[in-house]
Image: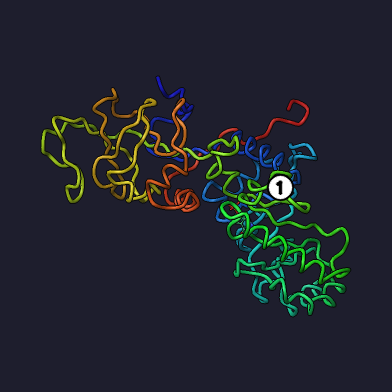
Amino acid sequence: MSDGHHRAAIYPRHHRAWLEVDGAALRHNARVLRARAGVPLVPMVKADAYGLGAVAVCRALGLPFAGATPQVAAPDAPWGVGVASLDEAAELRESGCTSRILCVTPLLATELTRARALDVRPALHRLDDITAWRRLGGAPWHLAIDTGMARAGVRWDAVAPLAGALLAVPPEGVFTHFHSADDDLASRDAQDARFEQALATLGDAVPADALLHRDNSGGIVSRTTGSPGHLARPGIALYGGMFDDVLDLAPVAHLRARVVDLREVHDGESVSYNATWRAQGTRRIATLASGYADGYRRHLSNRGEVLIHGHRCPVAGRVTMDMTMVDVTDVACAVGDIATLLGRDGDACLTAGMVGARADVSPYELLVGLALRVPRFHLDLAPASPSSA
Ligand SMILES: *Cc1c(COP(=O)(O)O)cnc(C)c1O
């Protein structure tokens, strides 16, 4: 009956736990972020699209694949995608993805040949690497400027020595990355100013048509008049993992597990390892086919809640590796019924922010951790064709 809530009826009865990735929700979030940013997006699909499946996410977002017509009309089409390693880029290329791919982490000099072969736009900032890239043919690349994150790129106040190399092999883009755009506007403004200072220092060494980009999700959300420059690089907001309280973002990831056992426990009896939960009166306990090996964090022991038929059921006792027990005394349920551990069930929703807060992990870690064992089902993979949109 409540299978209709989460469209689980389409799954064979033998699936006991799975992650549902909602392509329509992804596209909705991309539209919201595109409108907010006012510039084309570079969806960050690093870490297998935050655990949700990079190839499927690229397809859902309408990025070009060999043999497929691009489905998202020009102004809303992503400019390309961002990855963190060449292996991630290789996976996309092997799947037929012909999109622009930007690798945002510094590559080793020994990786540049492979980057070229994969048609990846590297983020470069060392003079030797820029020179080597020119010798490899000078394909498009982006200059990474560190404006205070202190993680990757050339310091904003040390760009001058690069000017000559930039004139020899002009970057397609120049970017920086914020450390606290979402919760500290003053720090964002300071990084903005440093970025502009670096561009001023480089002057004509940066081509007039270079693509400038700064904003991650937090940056996009922090602006009221759109993202500065020409592109924006959202990750977590695209996946509905943060900022769903300020923007109209939809949850994308739904972790489901079936009830695989049911029992009554009597007053004073315990549930799960170390007996950290004890029944007060007679309680009904359902066992779900998911545990921390599926990314349902152990810290949710006695703290988490799951949704069954739209009702909230508290976790009873320790989350174990493969199974989690919940108190279903107030909900009629049977073996085979579906519990939602993350995401939407009817009108009720457990967002990554809420579950992450209970689990004491960031929504980023929560989502990335879901890739551990459960199969992923991607729904609504193909965007509607532009004519019917
Ligand atoms: C991961 C990453 C992003 C996306 O960050 P979110 O906070 O997930 O939006 C953008 N740019 C760079 C360089 C990144 O490494």
Q: Position of residue 217 (x, y in %)?
A: 62, 49
Q: Is residue 261 above or below residue 114?
A: above
Residue 339 horizontal side relative to residue 158, left or right: left
Q: Residue 14's quadrant in the figure? A: top left
Instruction: Please identify the residue farthest to the front as the structure is shown.
Output: 186
For the point 60% across and 69% down, which residue is it?
Answer: 151
Work out which quarter of the rendered image holds the N terminus and state it. top left
The quarter of the rendering in which ligand 1 is drawn is bottom right
Give the camera-side residue of 247 and 233: 247
Q: Position of residue 334 (x, y in %)?
A: 29, 26
Q: Position of residue 388 (x, y in %)?
A: 74, 25
Q: How is the image coloured?
A: rainbow
Q: Amino acid at mark 1?
A: Leu
Q: Which residue is mark 1?
A: 41
Label 1 Cα neighbours within 10 Å, binned few <14 / some 14-19 / many ≥20: many
For the point 75% across and 52% down, which residue is it?
Answer: 228
> Tag count in the figure?
1
Q: Is residue 6 above or below residue 38?
A: above
For the point 36% across and 51% down, which residue is it?
Answer: 293
Work out which quarter of the rendered image holds the C terminus and state it. top right
Give the camera-side residue of 353 and 128: 353
For the point 73% across and 56% down, which residue is it?
Answer: 213
Callout 1: SS: loop
- Is label 1 within 8 A of ligand 1 (CB to nearest ligand atom)? no
Give the camera-side residue of 292 and 223: 223
Q: Position of residue 68 (x, y in %)?
A: 73, 40
Residue 207 horizontal side relative to residue 116, left or right: right
